[in-house]
Amino acid sequence: MIPGFRMDTVPGGRAVVVTIEGEVPRGAVSQANEDLLDLLGGECRYLILDCSRMTGVSSQGLGLVVYFASTLKRKGGAMLMVPPPAEVMRRIGGEALRGLVRFVASVEEAIRQTAEAAGPGAAEPFGQASKSG
């Protein structure tokens, strides 16, 4: 388990929601990568990052964002992000992610967008699969 890092699978398995609170410790980035690889296999096409309560991220963490955004784009999917507070966004150079990541106002908006892309019946509440810390 990674403190401040929670993952939930949206029903149907086409999206994973990751909520980050505080800062994921640098030493936990490898574990986060493994967890995401497990959940993003198969039918998953969308990764929703809720960074609204994030206070910072390491360069390794940013590297994961770029890697997964590019991978999902190649699979025909997308990464959607509820951005961190403005000062954190500036500090991490978040504007550079605009070409890879679709910014959204809320997790609910991101789920709605992924459900519309997935088709009817996909906008149900969160499923059972989750990992949190």
Image (cartoon, rainbow, N blue to C red):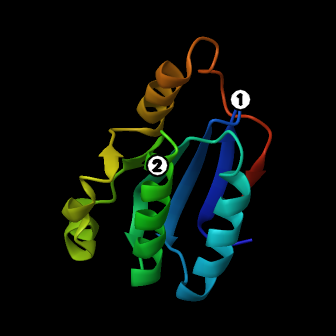
Left or right: 118, with 97 as reference point: right
Q: In which quarter of the image is the N terminus?
A: bottom right
Picture layout, residue 31 above or below residue 82: below
Residue lying at the far right of the rendered structure? 128
Quarter holding residue 9: top right
Q: Mark 2 points at which residue?
A: 74
Helix, strand or loop for disc 1: loop
Residue visible at 39% across and 82% down in the picture: 59
Contact between marks 1 and 2 (CB within 8 A): the answer is no
Measure how far apart labels 1 and 2 are at the Cα level.
20 Å
Q: Which is more toward the observer, 46 or 110? A: 46
Residue visible at 80% across and 39% down in the picture: 128
Residue visible at 68% across and 33% down in the picture: 126
Is any atom of residue 57 visible in this view?
A: yes
* Residue 95 image position (x, y, % from top left): 20, 61
Q: How many labels does the image show?
A: 2
Residue lying at the far front of the rendered structure? 74
Kind of residue at badge 1: Gly
Label 2 Cα crowd, 10 Å radius (few <14 / some 14-19 / many 20+): few
Helix, strand or loop for disc 2: helix
Q: Quadrant of the C terminus?
A: bottom right
Picture layout, residue 50 above or below residue 92: above
Q: Residue 113 — which label?
A: none
* Residue 121 image position (x, y, % from top left): 64, 13
Left or right: 77, with 16 as reference point: left
Picture layout, residue 102 above or below residue 124: below
Q: Mark 1 points at which residue?
A: 12
Is any atom of residue 133 visible in this view?
A: no
Which of the two labelled residues, at mark 1 and mark 2, occupies the earlier sequence position?
1
Picture layout, residue 72 above or below residue 64: above
